[in-house]
Amino acid sequence: MGRPGTSTACELDETERRDDRPDELQQEEADLRLSPGVDGEHRRADEVDEQVPGRLRVQHTKLRKDEAREDQQRAQDLDELMHESTSWEADLMSRRRRDRVRRTSSGAVAALTIAAAAVAAAALGAGAASPAAAGAATPLETLVGERLVVGMQGTTPSAALLDRIRRGRVGGVILMGANVRSAPQVRALTASLRAAADEGGVRLLIMTDQEGGLVRRFRWAPPAVAAEKLGMRTEGAIRRTGRATATALERLGVDVDLAPVADVPGVPGSFIAATDRGFSTNPTRAAKGVTAFAAGLLDGGVAPTLKHFPGLGLAATSTDDANVRITASEEALQPGFVPYRRAIAAGVAPVVMVSNAAYTAYRGQVAAWSPRVLSTLAGLGFTGVTITDALEPLARTHRVTLGQAALRAARAGVDLLLFVGSERSTDAVYDQLLAAARDGRLPRAALEASAARIEELAATYAG
């Protein structure tokens, strides 16, 4: 997910093409511009500065006081420059941001509570359910609907999409380049999506790809540079960039950033390296950058998404364009796990995107269709929400229907199913998944386990 070709630059009118970004973004880009003799992360690993402190955990409470003040001022300046909010609007958004960060820090406890409830419900389901329990059971329609993250057409949501949201047939919406014209337009768009969810009494996760560099849906918002250049900065600087990114996204009504890329380029011709999307070719250095950026997003109350497990650093071609098979052994894949291990141990990985590549190490299966891949991720200590990469390219490159691609991922145990195609196609997939739930191909216990994780994520970040 996150093809450079989906940039919004070609869609902006002449007024919006002006470089009227906040000064901090223009300065960030200037500061990071390399001299001609420097070749980014394509230098040898032994040239990487390994003097950066090797702390495993990024502690949210250990920012120096001056850094904290700087973060606060940067966020305030960004708000004023981008949105020209009135004082009461700024106060309201500040309260929302503080509340969201507070919910983020307390989310782990709530997750355990919800997970325990799900286990209890499953145990009760093994026997005769009581009348009260039966009456409280979540309808299959809701259990299926909240797993779908769908795309939309145009810059305003259709009546049909809003109706699906109200009815609980959609759990999330992803904003792509075609949905973006300006900050006020995006805020109006997300407000209408959120209003529909409120009317239906459901929560909705609004997502986007804001990696930096070429993959940046909101061209006026940070990061101004790609991960490769960010990876050359200190952990503190990367973290501040992550927080500035979260500030911009939160102001636009976005809950989840499908970033950072945790892939570690490891072969000549790596497409991740070619597009500057990886933090480093050195696994430890990459892990520090990934963890710092994710921590910064969390500081600002936006959920980060590490991608694309178990790694696309060994791929020469994007899975958006081809049927990619990675023939490396499980041992050879291990260096690519380092960023995931570090971020999970630091508690900054609430969401992980699973790759659309197939892996010889996992019986040749596509990662999104492989229970073994999900088990491997769990073995790293991950207990959060998993999400597929966009399923339309997967279906096309593997010559299956979109419904089949989605059903295989759901049966493997991936929680959220990501779609970027037409609204009509995703509505049809919903019907197919609901039929599978009704006939037992998607067991209720598995649906409820995913629901517990998704609902905790939404309770922490949505809105």
Image (cartoon, rainbow, N blue to C red):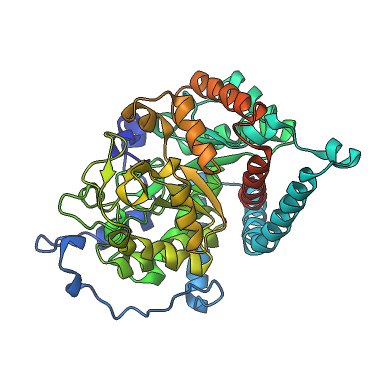
Most extreme residue toward the right is: 131
Most extreme residue toward the front is: 127
Residue 196, position in %: x, y? 67, 30
- Where does the C terminus fall, quadrant-wise? top right
The mark total stands at 0
Residue 78, position in %: x, y? 47, 54
- Frontmost residue, 114 versus 22: 114
The quarter holding residue 9 reads top left
- Frontmost residue, 375 versus 46: 375
Residue drawn at point x = 43 percent, y = 66 percent: 341
Indicate whether 106 appears above or below 368.
below
Most extreme residue toward the left is: 37
Q: Is residue 408 left or right of residue 128?
A: left
Q: Is residue 312 left or right of residue 63?
A: left
Residue 447, position in %: x, y? 64, 40
The quarter holding residue 329 reads bottom left
Indicate whether 112 appears above or below 124.
below
Indicate whether 60 appears above or below 399.
below
Residue drawn at point x = 31 percent, y = 62 percent: 331
- Frontmost residue, 96 versus 388: 388
In this view of the protein, can residue 84 be seen by the observer? no
Residue 3, position in %: x, y? 32, 38
In this view of the protein, can residue 452 be seen by the observer? yes
- Where does the N terminus fall, quadrant-wise? top left
